[in-house]
Amino acid sequence: MMMVVQEGIGGLTIDRVAAKAGMSKGGVFYHFKNKESLVTAMTERIIAEFEAECDSRMAAGATMIEATIEGAFSQDLRQKNRIAALITCCMNEPGFGTRFQSKYSEWLSDLAVKGGVDPGTARVIASAIDGYYLTEMLGVSRMTPSELGEMKARLLELGRPSARAELAQLFQFALATEESVG
């Protein structure tokens, strides 16, 4: 992944991957039929690792929105490099963005449905996270820990069910209770 981050997708060759992994070129071809299948496997792994992190947070009681936001803002350098590699692949590998698009759309839909928010709110949260990753990767805007904390808090608040929805549920409960008593 670091080859992609440091040198772009053009710097990723089967020869260099074999040398870095300490195996023969034939050994790499045994697992990956070409560079495209290697890139696809790499990105599938990045996505699977992020999903596993979110699943772990949700198993501990977080909503999908909370798990996603916590995961996005608690990335260490290795994890940020994985995201940078993914963005680099999307930008530089013909057709890759199209293949990744369906997975992203699926995640965005899950974020809305499992997160209990409307699709527009899910997209705003996802876009804020994407923007954060992109500005970090490009070095355009580095946030202080305080700024990161504020952004995270605002996104968490945005992902919280609205007070109006909570009030409607309480009202329905009150009506149901009144009907069962009366």
Image (spheres, helix red, strand yellow):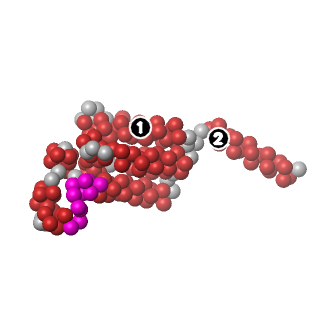
User: At 37% from the left edge and 40% from the top edge, which residue is drawn?
Assistant: 130
Q: Nearer the viewer, mark 2 or mark 1?
A: 1
Q: Position of residue 58 (x, y in %)?
A: 48, 56
Instruction: Say if residue 131 shows up in the picture.
Output: yes
Q: Majority secondary structure of the magenta segment? A: helix
Residue type at the position of mark 1: Ser
User: At 40% from the left edge and 37% from the top edge, which residue is drawn?
Assistant: 128
25 on left or right of 35: left
Element under label 2? helix
Q: Compared to 158, does 104 lie above or below?
A: below
Q: Position of residue 11 (x, y in %)?
A: 15, 47
Tag 2 and tag 1, C-beta contact below 8 Å = no
Residue, disc 2: 165
Dot 2 or dot 1: first in sequence order is: 1
Q: Position of residue 137 (x, y in %)?
A: 26, 40
Element under label 1? helix
Q: Compared to 47, does 149 lie above or below?
A: above
User: At 42% from the left edge and 48% from the top edge, which residue is drawn?
Assistant: 102
Q: Is residue 171 magenta?
A: no
User: At 79% from the left edge and 49% from the top edge, which residue is drawn?
Assistant: 176
The disc at residue 127 is 1
What are the residue bounds of the magenta stretch? 30-40
Q: CA distance from mark 2 to mark 1?
A: 24 Å
